[in-house]
Each structure stands twice: as structure tokens, then as C-alpha cells.
Image (tube, rainbow, N blue to C red):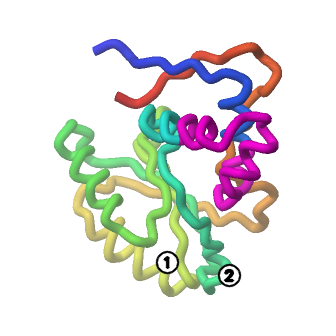
Amino acid sequence: MPAKHHTLDKVDRKLLNMLQKDNQISTRVLAEKLHISQPTCLRRIRELREAGIIAAEVAMVDPFALGYGMLAFLEISLNNQSDQHMQDFEQRMAKEAEVMQCYFVSGEYDYFLAVHVIDMDAYYQFVRRVISGSGNVRHFQSRFPMKRAKFTTRISFDEKAAEVLVRVPG
């Protein structure tokens, strides 16, 4: 099935940049800043949602502010890399609240996880229950960041190009 594409003009890209900074900004203010009408602004937002370019609108919660003071990065190698075993591992990680991100990666390891827990004891319990207890983990390595130098979820769109063609889900 061929990939679907969507063209983003300058207004779309500026709109996406603005929404990524603050998705609570009113459509009236957005429309004023974009020099378009409010109905046009609403239509563009709806189209970006329908195309899957705006994937979700959520509140970003700071885990550190809630006491989840330990972030761990895990590199994991599986014993069995059959498609079914990999799907089982991915489904299991998707169900674990501590797993914030899970990636199938190239290289020496099969998966890379970002895990947030309260402290080292919680991490130990997580490893025992989820990693060691999975039955299919051959080896894992943990890395603990000492400082977060940068964190963002924002994609920066060039607002100067006439239009940009993007691939959309589907």
C-alpha cells in the first residue's frame, strides 16, 4: 500500500509550531496571529487531525515533579528474535506503566527502553518483575542519566518554504 502524503503550506507549518508550544491557545488568537479567519483556522486544525499529523493533544506531566526521580535507559537483547517473540515483548512493554518509550533498534541490542521509576528500589523491582521475569531476555544493560540537558517533543517546521510534502499515517 503506497504511503499517503499531505502538503503543509506556510500557514499549516506556523499553526503546528504554535500549537506545539501551547495547544490551549484559543482559535481566535491563533487565527489573528496567522492572519486567517477563525473558521479557516478550525478547519485547518481539523484537517491536520484527520490526516494524522496532529496525533494527540495531551497534557505533558513532569515525572520528576511527581517524585519519579529515576530515569533509566535499558538496552535489551532477546534470546529469541522470532516475529512472535518480538511482538510478545512489545505488547508486554506497552502494558508496563514504568516504560515510557520502547524502540526496536539496530545494532548490538534488540530494544531500547526509557523507564521512569521513583527510586533504585522501584527500579530493582521493575527489573525483577518485567525484565528478568520475561523469560526471553538474554541480556540487558542499564544506563542512568546524571543530568537532562535537553528534552522536547516538538517538531520544528520551517515556515519559510512555500510548501512541504509530509508522509502521513494510513
Q: Is residue 67 above or below residue 9?
A: below
Q: Quadrant of residue 66?
A: bottom right
Farthest-out residue, left: 84
Position of 75 with respect to 131 (left or right) is right
Residue at disc 2, secondary structure: loop
Between 115 and 136, the one lying in front of the other is 115
Q: Residues within 10 Å of mark 1 (few under 14, many from 20)?
A: some
Label 1's element?
Answer: helix
Query: Mark 1 or mark 2, which is nearer to you?
Result: 2
The first of marks 1 and 2 along the sequence is 2
Q: Dot 1 corresponds to which residue? A: 123
Q: Is residue 57 left or right of residue 81?
A: right
Please state the horizontal and vertical placement of residue 123, each as a whole percent of the image.
49, 78
Estimate the spatial distance between the alpha carbons at disc 1 and disc 2, rounded to whole Å. 18 Å
The dominant secondary structure in magenta is: helix
Identified at 74% across, 14% down, the residue is 162
Check the picture and name the quadrant holding the N terminus.
Answer: top left
Q: Which residue in the structure is indicated by mark 2?
A: 65
**Quadrant of the frame with the C terminus:** top left
Q: Which residues are magenta?
A: 18-45
Q: Is residue 108 visible?
A: no
User: Residue, x 49% and y 34% (percent of image)?
Assistant: 47
Task: Determine the image quadrant of residue 139.
Answer: bottom left
Question: Residue at the location (78% across, 66% down)?
Answer: 147
Viewer-nearest residue: 166 or 138: 166
Q: Position of residue 86 (x, y in %)?
A: 26, 44
